[in-house]
Image (cartoon, rainbow, N blue to C red):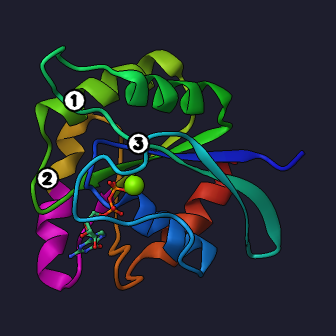
Amino acid sequence: PPPVLAVVGRPNVGKSTLVNRILGRREAVVQDTPGVTRDRVSYPADWSGRQFTLVDTGGWERDAKGLGSRVADQAEIAIALADAVLFVVDAVVGPTDEDEYVVRMLRRAGKPTLLVANKVDDQRGEADAALLWSLGLGEPYPVSALHGRGSGDLLDAALEVL
Ligand code: GDP
Ligand code: MG
């Protein structure tokens, strides 16, 4: 079977938008309302002639019960089943406590992980992306899932660890 690339991160950072960008079509549901993708959804994808399975997930949201929910469980399952992970952060918002929570979870999982600094729509956003070095996951890849900026470089890097 093709290798599995999971897309994780807290709600509203642009995971589903990135999935659609990678697929080259609008299949994953994008919403302004956080937390729309409640489950894992797998899509066949390819890049540079390599086939892989792309998994969109819901995210980690702080609610009355604290961090963790059925949605978060699905994201953790997606990571466990993945060969590599795209961890998406909103570079405009910057790193949040929820992002830090996911970082710890990713460390425990020990899967190859690329840090996606999303919503870098123009050159000015590059500085926001650089601040994400503080998460300790290595080089942030500046991307605009919405406009496509940086997504090719990201996928090239992802295929190297997949
Ligand atoms: P998810 O909850 O992480 O799957 O996030 P979505 O993909 O549903 O996107 C949440 C919101 O962020 C939507 O309004 C998107 O249009 C917006 N968004 C996603 N990617 C980008 C981006 O690269 N730039 C900007 N400006 N907005 C984005
Ligand atoms: Mg989504």
Side of 63 where 6 appears, left or right: right
Question: How many numbered badges does the structure rendering display?
Answer: 3
Please tell me the numbered disc located at residue 100. Answer: 1
Q: Is 125 displayed left or right of 59 in the figure?
A: left
Numbered tag placed on residue 131 in the rendering: 2
Kind of residue at badge 1: Glu
Cβ atoms under marks 3 and 1 closer than 8 Å: no
Question: Are the two marked residues, 2 and 3, in contact with CB atoms closer than 8 angstroms?
Answer: no
Q: Nearer the viewer, mark 2 or mark 1?
A: 1
Q: Tell me the SS state at disc 2.
A: helix
Packing grade of label 1 (10 A; few <14, some 14-19, many >=20) is few
The amino acid type of the residue labelled 3 equals Gly
Q: Is residue 55 above or below residue 111?
A: below
Quadrant of image for the N terminus? top right
Q: Is mark 3 within 8 Å of ligand 2?
A: yes
Characterize the local packing of mark 2: few (<14), some (14-19) or many (20 or more) Cα atoms within 10 angstroms. some
Q: Which residue is mark 3?
A: 58
> Residue 158, position in %: x, y?
59, 56
Q: Quadrant of residue 43 in the image?
A: bottom right
Does any atom of ligand 1 lie closer than 8 Å to the CB of label 2? no
Q: Residue at x 39, y 27 (%)?
A: 72
**Which circle, 2 or 3, is nearer the viewer?**
3
- How far from the left and from the top, in percent, is residue 86? 48, 49
Q: Given the image, on which type of amino acid does mark 2 rest?
A: Leu
